[in-house]
Amino acid sequence: MRFLLYTHSLVSDWNHGNAHFLRGVMRELIARGHDAIALEPEHGWSRRHLVAQNGSVATERFERDFPTLRTQVYDEDFDHEAALAVADVVIVHEWIEPELVARIGRARREGGAFTLFFHDTHHRAVTATSDIADLMLQDYDGILAFGETLRQRYVDAGWGPRAFTWHEAADDRLFRPLPEVEKTGDLVWIGNWGDEERSAEIGAFLIEPARRLCIDGTVYGVRYPDQALIALDEAGLRYRGWIANADVPHAFAGHRVTIHVPRRPYLDSLRGIPTIRVFEALACGIPLISAPWDDAENLFRPGKDFLFAQDSDEMTGLLAQVLNDADRAAELAASGLEIIRTRHTCRHRVDELFSILAACGTARVLDQLIPMEAAQ
């Protein structure tokens, strides 16, 4: 089948975590013999910032790191209807401009034979409700929401047709343990500062414990204001800025522990949704300690796959425990890796996508699914 994915960017992962997941999904689809191509806007925000801060070499990394993936840039003159006409499945990310979201839906309503999904991997449904409510989703075949609470939000609000839970996951072709890499640091945190959504939490769960323990640590991410950079430096943490996602497994492998600090919307309104970094860290076999969030969907086994710290003091104690107890660290790493490999890889999500297609796919898709199922 031919899959067409509208994304804010496949090339740039600068403050754009959805690129991680879509790359993994596309690689899995291609490995199964399907055709997959991404369309992204010519002047996308993430790509512009990536090039402005790191030069064209940053985008050239994409072709080197992901040679099997295809992406095409569109401008205001691009013929979307022609691209849609030859697609079997179209997935439109929620960061696509509203006018284009409506245009794609209209093409489906006016006879398009493709199956059309709207893919939401953000918190705007609860923090900027009108942005989602005003979208024209009635012509879409389904909503793919990256958590059950978000799916329920679509159902309760009557936005669009059927809604399905489709969590993100780790691309374990890329995210895997690298035991040959020497560990040169204690703590690594890979996360963006964002829009003041977790500023206090970063201070409490990262900066203060690192300062108290005199940890040898490294921080990667973008959009850090000057006062944050000063705080990292005073805590003895090295700030390294943007890191290409393909380099993240090596960064994890070179450190002994990592942490997770969720954004406030995922605590207050969207329970049970971890960021993709949780999946990726566990897939790399590094022990993980998380600030509080509610694993409402039982995705993991807290206390076994990773540890929860309820406050700054507990994070400090757990970091000290993991750094000083090699056996405990190894147990956490092994368990976290096991849960990813058994439940949370992009292979699992593609399996789920095909189950969703079997439930609401168009005739064109169903005709292709039936022979596949018969062959299994």
Image: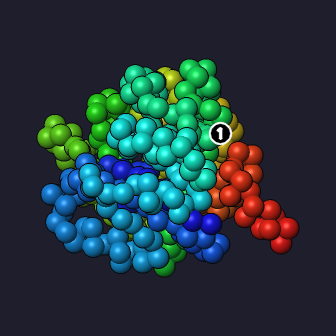
Residue at image position (52%, 66%) is: 36
**Amino acid type of the residue that numbered disc 1 sits on in the rendered structure:** Phe
207 vs 332: above or below: above
Q: Position of residue 277 (x, y in %)?
A: 47, 51
**Position in image of residue 239 (x %, y %):** 24, 54
Quadrant housing residue 238: bottom left
The quadrant of the rendering that contains the C terminus is bottom right
Eyeballing the image, is 144 above or below 347? above
Horizontal side of 111 relative to 5 (left or right) equals: right
Q: Which residue is mark 1?
A: 164
Give SS at disc 1: strand
Write the residue at 45% across / 24% down: 133
Residue 171 in view: no
Residue 333 lies in quadrant: bottom right
Q: Residues within 10 Å of mark 1 (few under 14, many from 20)?
A: many
Residue at left offset 59%, top offset 59%: 88
Residue 173 location, quadrant: bottom right
Residue 5: percent from left, percent from top: 48, 56
**Residue 319 percent location from the top left of the image:** 46, 46
Left or right placement of residue 352 versus residue 213 in this view:
right
Please state the total of marks drawn on the protein image.
1
Q: Is residue 38 visible?
A: yes
| Quadrant position of the N terminus in the picture | bottom right
Which is nearer the eye, 258 or 264? 264
Q: Nearer the viewer, residue 247 or 187?
A: 247
Q: Quick check: 304 left or right of 75?
A: right
Residue in front for this viewpoint, 43 or 27: 43
Colour scheme of this structure image?
rainbow
